[in-house]
Image (cartoon, grey):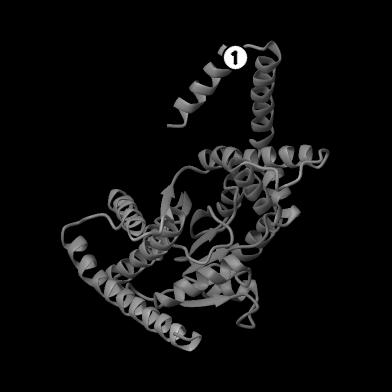
Amino acid sequence: MDLHQIRKQIDNIDDSILELFAKRFDLCKEISSYKEKNNLSLKDNNRELEIIKERTTKFSELGHNEPEFVEDIFTLILDKSRQKIRYCQHKEGEPKIISIIGGRGKMGSLFAEEFRKRGHTVLVSNEEKTNSIELAQKGNLVIVTVPIHKVGEVLKEVIPHLKEDALLTDFTSIKEEPLEIMKNSGSSFVGGHPLFGQVKSLDDKNFILTPGRGSFSWYQELLQSIGLNVIVMPAQEHDKAMAVVQCLTHFSNMAFANLLKKMEIKENISTPAYKSRLKKIKRMFSQDASLISEIQFRNKFSEKMAADYLQSVTELQQIVSSGSKDKFESLFNEAKEALK
């Protein structure tokens, strides 16, 4: 066969793959109906793990031992299938006017697109040739998504102009401080924090809500309808958790990177674990320094968390200095058990 004939065969195979994808996604309607009728969870972790394991084995039997490739492909397929099922299950409620102040950023734009898909009118500051005050006056839901250092200023600007029946919220990585300002409003309010950055899909991402005043159930349901795992917790509990999840992660990554800059280790001399750590650190450094510093310095629990981390490092360093393998292995196993 010449090159043209080979490519024609590949094109035919690709067409068949797309037809099978279409058939698979069409079945999502039936799965949606069955799960809804039998009150079953949207995501079945055991089933998804079973699918990936079986498909990996099958592909290997066909002569291609590519477990990472199979996992990546079927993770995408399963994610898209859940989106299809969720869309089928979504029940349209009364359309709302959602005002997103600062919504021209990547996070605001992503949410605006999803809210519009659900039939809501979404107004975005500057996009609609309107300012923050006008958006506050119109919105049933008013979302403030601006840099952390501007949140207080913007909240104070819009609060006097909210409708009485409006729900005020934000997308900020600290919660006690904004909620304290929101108390000055006469409307309902709830804190919000998307636990992700730049993503292509909201499916199966975590989102925290911290109760303030009034009901926010319809907003929680809206977030769940666009694929988010919504976690409800008190503001202080959130900030303490973020001192670990965000502040400590950034702190330890910066300490590691700061040490590496003083050393001369070529990146090609690495283990998979080391490469994985570098990849995650580089992802953090792809973000703006001001964002990372705001997260670190605005969280009142971050300083203590850094001190606790240094104490833990010192404890480990002392064990290494003492030459005690038994203590090292004991600490290793204790940490291993705690992470199960």
Front residue (pair 303, 139): 303
Q: Is residue 259 above or below residue 129?
A: above
Image coordinates for residue 85, horizontal then vertical, percent = 30, 67
Question: What's under tag 1, amino acid-wise?
Answer: Lys
User: Which quadrant of the structure image shows residue 89?
Assistant: bottom left
| Quarter of the rendering containing residue 220 | bottom left
Residue 120, horizontal then vertical, whole percent: 43, 76
Residue found at x 67% / y 17% = 320
- The residue drawn where x is 35% and y is 59% is 59
Mark 1 falls on what kind of element? helix
Observer able to see residue 249: yes
- Can residue 97 be seen by looking at this rendering? no
Where is residue 266 shown, x and y percent of the image? 76, 45
Quadrant where the N terminus sits is bottom left
Location of the C terminus (image quadrant): top left
Look at mark 1 in the image and give the residue it sits on: 325
Which image quarter: residue 130?
Answer: bottom right
Pick the front one: 165 or 69: 69
Viewer-side residue, 16 vs 149: 16
Above or below 259: residue 210: below
In the picture as drawn, the residue positioned furthest to the right comes out as: 262
